Image: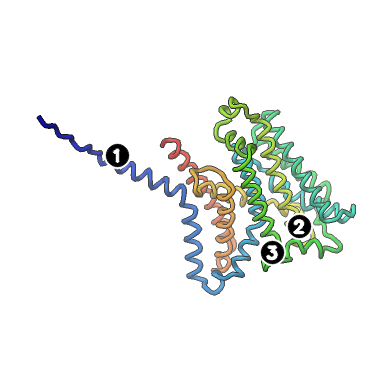
Amino acid sequence: MTSTIEPTVIPPSETTATRSGRSMRWLGRYGALLVLGILVVVTSILEPNTFATTSNLVNILNQSALAAIIAMGLTFALVTGEFDLSIGNVASLSGVVACTVMLKAGFSIPLALVTVLVMGFGLGLVNGFVVTYLNVQALVATLGVGTVVIGINYAISDGSPISLENPDAFINLSFNRFLGVPYPVFVMLGLGVFLWLLLNRTVLGQSMQAVGGNPVAAELSGIRVDRIRVIAFAVCSACAALTGFLLASRTGSAAVAAGDSYLLSAFAAAFFGSAVLRDGQFHIIGTIVGVITVSVGFNSIALIGLETYYQYLFQGMLLILGVGVGSLARRRAAAA
């Protein structure tokens, strides 16, 4: 007696659904890189003599530096499942404080840097305590703290720009070069390596990711969830303060709202970067890719000669695309 094994027949609808799921998963992981690649290729074809050059690459990296620093800090808050809407205000206050202490108190540049980093770290702790111990939603808490920061900023500066009398040494921080590359690019790369190691190779970073993934499970496993969130906010604000300091060094002066515009760019980069290589998870490399994508887009728009408002359209669309693809990727990953 012989028996035959009937071949398994997969319904056409199931096969189509599987292929669709794989396509969406691929798009979720590599779609952001695809967008960046398309931007580079198209602009290289349209502007071969100005875009695809070493000097323009250095220019793009230099333009990315400050946005990357503040966005990498924001990534820590996002990794733990929180938001920080005060980073732009902290960056603005940082520049004003740095110029004020150097102009009126005679602080050296390193001492002014330490001052603003401590200030940023402290404001992050305030954000964290309001969110965790007062149980205020991060959206409301950071908006409130950011508004207080604006008030402090106006109280210090009286609403007027603060300029150094001898800004040369301060300005050199932004415009001096090593091996033909501006200092802020090295700051961005060095800080990126440090924050990547902190987030991926330390117990603290692993705890942050665990808190963001499932706070209840993290707490049951012995992680002090509130403390981890407070530290994440502190790192986030310290990076914002460093951004404001470097921003002021570009001109040797600080305006009361100079850093505010970095809020949207930081969120756009972080959310867009969450769709890079991972299923909608925030991470440092993705954030850097997101920042560079924004900078390449802005650079392309300028070189092609489009109006400035296209930059806002591009940035907004990038934020929507990043959130949409990231959310879709997370749903696909959860359903897998």
User: From mark 2 to mark 1, how far is it between C-alphas?
Assistant: 58 Å
Q: Which residue is mark 3?
A: 182
Q: Residue at x 62, y 50 (%)?
A: 266
Q: Quadrant of the C terminus?
A: top left
Work out which residue is located at the far bottom of the displayed protein and give it.
Answer: 49
* In the foreground, 33 or 302: 33
SS assignment at label 2: helix
> How busy is the neighbourhood of tag 1: few (under 14 within 10 Å), some, or many (20 plus)?
few
Q: Does the rendering let one see residue 309?
A: no
Residue 307 left/right relative to 87: left
> How busy is the neighbourhood of tag 2: few (under 14 within 10 Å), some, or many (20 plus)?
many
Residue 277, horizontal then vertical, whole percent? 49, 48
Type of amino acid under label 2 = Ala
Q: Quadrant of the N terminus?
A: top left
Residue 328, horizontal then vertical, whole percent? 46, 42
User: From mark 2 to mark 3, how far is it between C-alphas?
Assistant: 15 Å
Quarter of the figure with residue 185? bottom right
The earlier-in-sequence mark between 2 and 1 is 1
